[in-house]
């Protein structure tokens, strides 16, 4: 062996066995003095080799620490930081398991936050009271702690569930170092082996260095997360401020527009339109009985029962919500004066209402209540002026006719001039509003008006009942924007005749409603005998009568598209002539005969008998009057 061969071995980074092999070869053929020199050179070479190996290891560790620091400073997610710390610790120390534990200040214990290399489900979920296990030793005395056999270590406070998890994981040797930040322990970084192992000072120093980098990186990640959370919160606050500003502007706009409606003498429909426009929805206004007072930007009905929401709004004084089958929202607010329920305001939207939206809805309900109270006050004032006189007249016209004439003259009304009497049913409008509008209309005619039995009664000068009623009711419809059905009678002269005409007009109105002819005007000649038959009936009773008398024929026509009912009506109209019926219907007489045969099969062969024929003709008249409506 020569010095050159030793240098070559050092240069090749040969293992120690190669050096010893060269030394044994030299001992065979080298004298004693030369052998002693070679042994000295061999010792120097081994020291140099050991130094070089240490240097390489140190450089590797420094490079690993540098890479770790570089990796950690680039990470911003806390979980990613923790995973990187534990993985690099296990990698650098060639350990079977790495894990990082943090102190939970709220529960005064420690928990394993992140693991790398764990093989059991129980170990990563461990929680340890402060002062127990290797973790407790590291945190209690913020210095590194190592054991080559954890279960046999006497200086550690053991817990049964911790030891059981350790056995399941197969842990023997453990090394832990504290995570220190500004002198405060926040947790510990630990590595473990599943066999006995003595950790060197260099390994302890290496893990401590990594823990120092990790603590700083962990704190930076925490601060970064807090900063990011603060930025998110600030953005959210800014968004809320902007939304609140928009809401205030919306509320201010709603307030100004609702005030304009009141100042300009608008009605409930105008209020509903403002609300629908401001809150971009559909609006319905109902009276306490559920009758529609106004609709804006929507269907005629909300499409869901509002009873529970109305009850809640009345109880709490705030708006309530109900959801339709399609997921749309119906928000309900009530207008009331004290405990009196005046109206219900309903807003329909596809999205829920915000706080400002609810306040606008509730303010609209207040405005609606004020408007209704104002309209009611006006109506009551008008009714007191003229309505009291009309009510007294209709209640007892014979009490003192001359007194009625005198009272009427004070209001520029002449009861001895021809008068037309109108009894009107105002639909979808609060009745006091209808009465108020009617009172203003008749003032210009020097007439009388008032509410009686829920209907508006008008007595106005005129000799043409239908013409006068058509004019008055047309103006009433235009003023309230809703349908009006009216019965009319006259002309009547004197208190007694006015009362008789009132009863006749009542009968005409009742007949129209029973025939479901809403929105029409009729007098006695128009309705004929139906006025007497239907004056106390309603639409349901008319339906029942038609079904009892003509039900099979009507059903047959509806299902098959035939004209048996029209043929039967024409047959009675011409007195039973097949040819005349055929000519009127533009069909062959044989066709008429076939149709009448089918009628007999449906109604029975005795349908031509006088008593049955009378019932059938009455039913046909009602049927025809309904057809005239359509």
Image: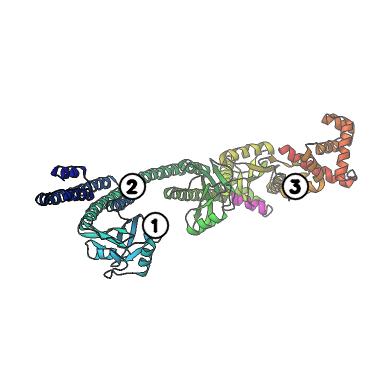
Q: Which numbered disc flags the more N-terminal residue, 1 or 2?
A: 1
* Front residue of 160 and 320: 160
Give the answer, above or below, for where 108 lies relative to 552: below
Q: Which residue is mark 3?
A: 543
Question: Most prominent secondary structure in the magenta stretch?
Answer: helix
- Distance Cα–Cα, label 3 vs label 2: 67 Å
Residue 97 falls in which quadrant of the image? bottom left
Residue 517 in view: yes
Tag 1 secondary structure? loop
* Front residue of 508 and 569: 569
Q: Which residue is mark 1?
A: 119
Q: Which numbered disc flags the more N-terminal residue, 3 or 1?
A: 1
Tag 2 secondary structure? helix
Q: Pointers 3 and 2 in contact (CB under 8 A)?
A: no
Mark 1 or 2, which is nearer the eye?
1
Which quadrant of the figure contains the C terminus? top right
Residue numbers of the magenta segment: 385-399
Q: Which residue is mark 2?
A: 232
Marker count (numbered): 3
**Percent position of residue 389, x then y:** 61, 50
Mark 3 or 2, which is nearer the eye?
2
């Amino acid at each position: 062996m020569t010095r050159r061969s030793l240098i070559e071995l050092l240069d090749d980074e040969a293992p120690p066995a190669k050096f010893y092999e060269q030394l044994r070869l030299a001992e065979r053929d080298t004298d004693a003095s030369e052998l002693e020199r070679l042994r000295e050179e061999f010792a120097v070479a081994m020291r140099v080799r050991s130094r070089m190996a240490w240097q390489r290891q140190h450089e590797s560790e420094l490079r690993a620490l540098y890479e770790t620091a570089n990796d950690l400073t680039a990470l911003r997610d806390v979980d990613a930081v923790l995973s990187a710390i534990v993985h690099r610790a296990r990698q650098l120390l060639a350990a079977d398991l790495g894990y990082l534990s943090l102190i939970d200040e709220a529960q005064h214990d420690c928990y394993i936050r992140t693991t790398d290399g764990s093989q059991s489900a129980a170990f990563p979920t461990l929680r340890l009271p402060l002062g127990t296990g290797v973790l407790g030793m590291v945190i209690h005395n913020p210095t590194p702690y190592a054991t080559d056999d954890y279960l046999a270590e006497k200086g550690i406070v053991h817990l049964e569930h911790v030891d059981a998890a350790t056995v399941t994981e197969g842990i023997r040797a453990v090394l832990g170092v504290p995570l220190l930040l500004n002198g405060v322990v926040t947790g510990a970084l630990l590595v473990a082996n599943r066999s006995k192992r003595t950790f060197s000072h260099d390994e302890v120093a290496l893990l401590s260095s990594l823990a120092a980098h990790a603590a700083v990186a962990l704190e930076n990640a925490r601060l970064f997360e807090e900063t990011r959370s603060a930025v998110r919160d600030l953005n959210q606050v800014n968004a809320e401020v902007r939304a609140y500003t928009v809401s205030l502007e919306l509320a201010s706009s709603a307030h100004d527009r609702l005030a304009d409606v009141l100042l300009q003498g608008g009605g409930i429909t105008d209020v509903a339109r403002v609300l629908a426009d401001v809150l971009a929805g559909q609006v319905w206004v109902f009276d306490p009985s559920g009758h529609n007072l106004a609709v804006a930007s929507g269907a005629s009905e909300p499409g869901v029962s509002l009873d529970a929401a109305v009850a809640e709004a009345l109880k709490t004084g705030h708006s309530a919500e109900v959801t339709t089958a399609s997921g749309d929202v119906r928000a309900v607010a009530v207008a009331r004066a004290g405990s009196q329920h005046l109206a219900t305001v309903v807003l329909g939207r596809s999205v829920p209402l915000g706080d400002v939206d609810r306040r606008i809805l509730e303010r609209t309900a207040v405005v609606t209540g004020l408007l209704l109270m104002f309209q009611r006050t006006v109506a009551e004032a008008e009714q007191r002026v003229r309505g009291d006189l009309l009510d007294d007249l209709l209640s007892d016209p014979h009490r003192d006719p001359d007194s009625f004439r005198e009272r009427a003259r004070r209001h520029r009304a002449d009861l001895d001039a021809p008068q037309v009497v109108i009894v009107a049913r105002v639909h979808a409008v609060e009745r006091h509003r209808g009465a108020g509008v009617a009172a203003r209309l008749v003032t210009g005619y020097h007439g009388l008006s008032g509410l009686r039995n829920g209907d508006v009664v008008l007595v106005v000068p005129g000799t043409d009942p239908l013409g006068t009623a058509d004019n008055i009711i047309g103006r009433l419809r235009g003023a309230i924007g809703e349908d009006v059905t009216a019965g009319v009678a006259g002309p009547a002269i004197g208190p007694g005749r006015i009362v008789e005409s009132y009863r006749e007009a009542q009968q005409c109105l009742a007949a129209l409603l029973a025939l479901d002819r809403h929105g029409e005007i009729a007098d006695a000649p128009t309705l004929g005998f139906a006025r007497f038959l239907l004056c106390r009936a309603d639409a349901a009773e008319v339906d029942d009568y038609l079904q009892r008398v003509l039900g099979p024929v009507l059903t047959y026509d509806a299902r098959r598209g035939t004209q048996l009912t029209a043929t039967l009506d024409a047959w009675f109209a011409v007195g039973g002539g097949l040819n005349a019926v055929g000519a009127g219907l533009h069909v062959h007489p044989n066709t008429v005969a076939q149709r009448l045969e089918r009628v007999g099969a449906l109604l029975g062969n005795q349908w031509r008998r006088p008593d049955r024929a009378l019932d059938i003709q009455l039913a046909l008249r009602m049927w025809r009057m309904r057809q005239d409506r359509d």
